[in-house]
Amino acid sequence: MQSKKDEVKKDIEAAALQTFFEKGFVETKMSDIADAIGISVGNIYTYFKNKKDLFYSVVPPILVDYLKKILVETIHFDNQHFPVDADSEARSSLFQAQIDLLATYNRQIIIIFEKNKGTSYVNAKNELVDLMVETKKAYLTPPSKHHELNPDEHMAMLHIIAHHIIDMNLDLLKREMSADSRRRIFQTLSVYQLNGMKSLYDS
Amino acid sequence: MQSKKDEVKKDIEAAALQTFFEKGFVETKMSDIADAIGISVGNIYTYFKNKKDLFYSVVPPILVDYLKKILVETIHFDNQHFPVDADSEARSSLFQAQIDLLATYNRQIIIIFEKNKGTSYVNAKNELVDLMVETKKAYLTPPSKHHELNPDEHMAMLHIIAHHIIDMNLDLLKREMSADSRRRIFQTLSVYQLNGMKSLYDS
Amino acid sequence: MQSKKDEVKKDIEAAALQTFFEKGFVETKMSDIADAIGISVGNIYTYFKNKKDLFYSVVPPILVDYLKKILVETIHFDNQHFPVDADSEARSSLFQAQIDLLATYNRQIIIIFEKNKGTSYVNAKNELVDLMVETKKAYLTPPSKHHELNPDEHMAMLHIIAHHIIDMNLDLLKREMSADSRRRIFQTLSVYQLNGMKSLYDS
Amino acid sequence: MQSKKDEVKKDIEAAALQTFFEKGFVETKMSDIADAIGISVGNIYTYFKNKKDLFYSVVPPILVDYLKKILVETIHFDNQHFPVDADSEARSSLFQAQIDLLATYNRQIIIIFEKNKGTSYVNAKNELVDLMVETKKAYLTPPSKHHELNPDEHMAMLHIIAHHIIDMNLDLLKREMSADSRRRIFQTLSVYQLNGMKSLYDS
DNA sequence: CATGAATGAGAGTTCATTCAT
DNA sequence: AATGAATGAACTCTCATTCAT
């Protein structure tokens, strides 16, 4: 029965995704997954070579590359359409597509960036932050004098802001809501972020 | 020698704090702590009933209450001294004291909010966020019409921003730097946050 | 179709024989056998009760009895046609028949004597050696004095040589070669063995 | 208590050596070793990193190098003191030292050559045979014509004989006996082997 | 008080065997 | 008769906790 077999595999993947999302890789026991769908632990090994195989089947590395790609795209877009207008039609339709796609893989993305202990994704968030700072830096004038940050402090601040722009969007992905709601909140948060930045770099 | 005994206990607590900070509760092995100060694993049990007892001695629940208290204070202060001026002397001296105190307990705070797997603090960050939103809400006018967020979406957005303000400050605590640097960056981030908020709620 | 059914059984037996020969009993997995002939693992259990049942169907205990019988025959022959002449026509034609027969069951024989872990044949080689020594002893004069072996040592030596004669022939069976080659090498090894023995027992 | 600790480690090593000797690496369960000396399985891991670490502590790779070295020495000696006299004083005293040393490590040697499944020693015997044939070949005239072996058959025969000269000596090591007995039997077996060879290569 | 060897529960994984289809 | 998914026991290894010394 092919359909039956495929169904169990899908069940395992679904339970694994959910459990990895809730507990992370290390804290997830094979028995957690098996119990969730009422099969024996051993039977998981009928479908997946081992725990890592199951994990990477459910949270594939290619997602990281994709996320990096759209992050860079977004930064370039925002800076090439200066002055920033978070409500513009073009920006809106570009990001609508992206946020929808991210929402599809929201649990995988959370796993990659926040539940990554014991996996190859441990440094994924830092790498994304570094890439973000690197990409953004080209567009930044030095911060206004009156904040009196030295270069090291300036870099640290940029990393913190980058980190948390990413985290805000991760947080948005984490929450259950309609695609429309997510898009609207995403737009609003963009306004928050862009105006926060503007206040630091405008004279 | 009571002093000798106390010293060993202090050593254990210091090593435990550092290791819980680096690895979190679950990933920290009793042998990691013992090795760090050159005593036997068993001897830890002379001073602490078990791993959890040691953990809560070093990261006491009362810290959470204290953190909640100063958060609420800060919000009230900011809103009672409207219009917001992040650079005001009064604000500055209030927060200077607070950020210094937070810095003293930075590792405990990180543990409570970010390395809390397996402990009773798993929900600490969410509780803090809820409190922050609850406190702030009283001061907020509905967001400008053109963002078109319904009440649920508005609440979600507030939670995300609250989350993100907390995370930014945690991130600042996490980094090694001088007290002065930390204060300056803290000020700058406040400007970012306050102007971000202003752009959402000012007409 | 009885013939169809029998054919599958024969296929299983053939694959099992080959795999037991290559890996031994313990290391052979039921799936190795099933995969080799493209049937399901479960189907093996249609024809055989379990792994041991399959094993003993393919490597039957009666073979051991047969091997013991021809060993004894050979020894008697050699000693009744004294002085030994390894090249004699009579010896040659007797052993030609035997070596050919052994070659037919070469894999079973190797399994019985060398891949017997986990089976009832663990002691088969020792039993054969004992029988060989027992049979041969009747024909032996005490070894020449100048070797100065006491009776226990003499017995140990006989066991070792018996072991070794058996092993040499097993080794010959193990190697892929033509029946003619095998016969010629068998003859040559006989010369080696008989002259080795003669040098110990001739004055 | 250092002495107590060392004793347990020695007990584990002794039990491991004996069990590896009896069952081989793969078939030996950690619980076999633990049960043999009445400790828990987990406690073995106090002294050894894992099963392989324990194995190679007890059967070190350096033994193989040593065995190869003395094999080559022996062959060269025998052939440089032609015509062979197995009873010569020089040969006797040379080999007396060697066989005594081999006897000390008899179980390790058996493990290396006969109980090596799952270890890095799987090919040890074949390598030793190859080395032996290679070393010996230089001293050999072609076998007498009347045996009518072609070169391939000749090589196969040499390998078989080499294999079983090694096996004879392994067999001798396997048996419990006094050092004197072992030496005497070793001498006698040498006579057997050397005269067997002589009968093949002398005209 | 201090030690660290010892324990035992539980993790991931393998595989002979069963059984619903 | 044939399938192969499913099971469960057994394996290696880890680590919080205990306890004799």
Image (cartoon, coloured by chain):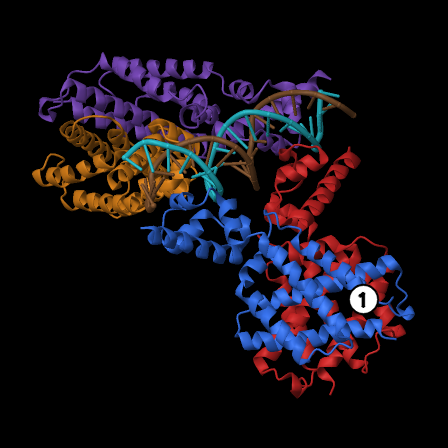
Chain colours: A red, B blue, C purple, D orange, E brown, F cyan
Vertical placement of residue D17 versus B17, above or below: above
Chain of the residue on which disc 1 is drawn = B
Question: Are there few (<14), some (14-19), or many (20+) residues within 10 Å of tag 1?
Answer: few
Does A58 sit left or right of D68 as displayed?
right
The residue that mark 1 highlights is B139
Vertical placement of residue D54 versus B89, above or below: above
Secondary structure of the residue carrying tag 1 is loop
Does A163 sit left or right of C149 as displayed?
right
Q: Quadrant of residue A32?
A: top right
Q: Quadrant of the C terminus of chain A?
A: bottom right
Residue drawn where x is 54% and y is 61% of the image: B107
Q: Position of residue B144 (x, y in %)?
A: 89, 70
Q: Quadrant of residue C125?
A: top left
Q: Quadrant of residue A47?
A: top right
Q: Quadrant of the N terminus of chain A?
A: top right
Residue situated in front as seen by the camera: B74 or A194: B74
Residue situated in front as seen by the camera: A121 or D95: A121
Q: Position of residue A195 (x, y in %)?
A: 78, 76
Residue drawn where x is 58% and y is 56% of the image: B63
Q: Is residue D95 visible?
A: yes
Q: Position of residue A154 (x, y in %)?
A: 62, 79
Residue situated in front as seen by the camera: D57 or D127: D57
Q: Position of residue C91 (x, y in %)?
A: 33, 19
Does C73 sit left or right of B25 as displayed?
left
Residue type at mark 1?
A: Tyr
Q: Is residue A73 visible?
A: no
Residue situated in front as seen by the camera: A164 or B188: B188
Vertical placement of residue A129 versus F8, above or below: below
